[in-house]
Amino acid sequence: MANSNGSFGLRPIGKIGQATNSTGMTEYRIASDNSNPIFQGMPVIPLAAGVIDDLQAAAGGNVSIVGVFGGCEYVSSTTGETIFSNQWPGSGADSNYPVKAFLYDDPNQLFTVATSNVVAAANTEAEVRAAVFANIALATGNSGSTTTGISSATADLNTIATTNTLALRIMGIQDDPDNSDFTAAGIPLIVRINNHFNAPTGSIAAGTVSTTGV
């Protein structure tokens, strides 16, 4: 039976170890003239201008992920009202006010993410479980639904490797009877972010994409 999971980006589910899990978010800023849509559940990167952006804004090379987007607050340039949204639409903000982004940015945060595909080497539970503690790349990490505001990011089983520059580390498989068909896409992996910008050993600098308004 096919899995019920569609794509939903990275969904926070807990923390590593016995630390308090507040499911709290930290406030960052988005440039008011940033035209890149950012969806709930989308990993984002820090820019040298002191703001965050979606993954595609990386100006070459690997840029550390600073967290996962949970939502934003901004003042509408049309109505003057404060908007609370689970997505940044890429326009519509009054530049006289900040665009506040809220991120799940703890390096110890665990997420669940759906697999995007089926591959011959990982189409049984035993084969996927053998990939726990390996690393995996995102698929469709920069897109989402403008209707729901939810990211379409998934994990690409073709990319499982020990390469530590891949975006995610597999920490387990979430128990979910409705998503337990390993011959279909939609298996819920438990992951953490690799090379997290906020980690004590984070070594990848912020991106250098130029931005203007903040």
Image (cartoon, rainbow, N blue to C red):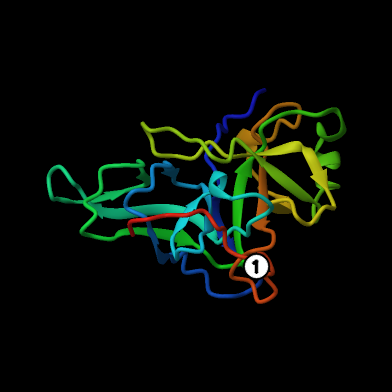
Residue that extends furthest to the top in the rendered view of this protein: 1
Amino acid type, label 1: Ile
Residue occupying image coordinates x 53% and y 36%: 152
Picture layout, residue 63 above or below residue 3: below
Expressed as whole percent of the image width and height from the top left, the position of residue 212 reads 37, 56
Residue occupying image coordinates x 63% and y 57%: 63
Picture layout, residue 35 above or below residue 172: above
Expressed as whole percent of the image width and height from the top left, the position of residue 112 reads 60, 49
Expressed as whole percent of the image width and height from the top left, the position of residue 158 reads 79, 35
Residue occupying image coordinates x 79% and y 57%: 164
Residue occupying image coordinates x 46% and y 53%: 69
Quadrant assignment, res 178 = top right
- Residue where numbered disc 1 is placed: 16
In-front residue for pair 126/48 = 48
Expressed as whole percent of the image width and height from the top left, the position of residue 94 reads 21, 51
Q: Secondary structure at mark 1?
A: loop
Quadrant housing the N terminus: top right
Is 211 situated left or right of 159 in this image? left
Quadrant housing the C terminus: bottom left
Residue that extends furthest to the left in the rendered view of this protein: 79
All told, the count of numbered labels is 1
Q: Residues within 10 Å of mark 1 (few under 14, many from 20)?
A: few
In-front residue for pair 30/153 = 30
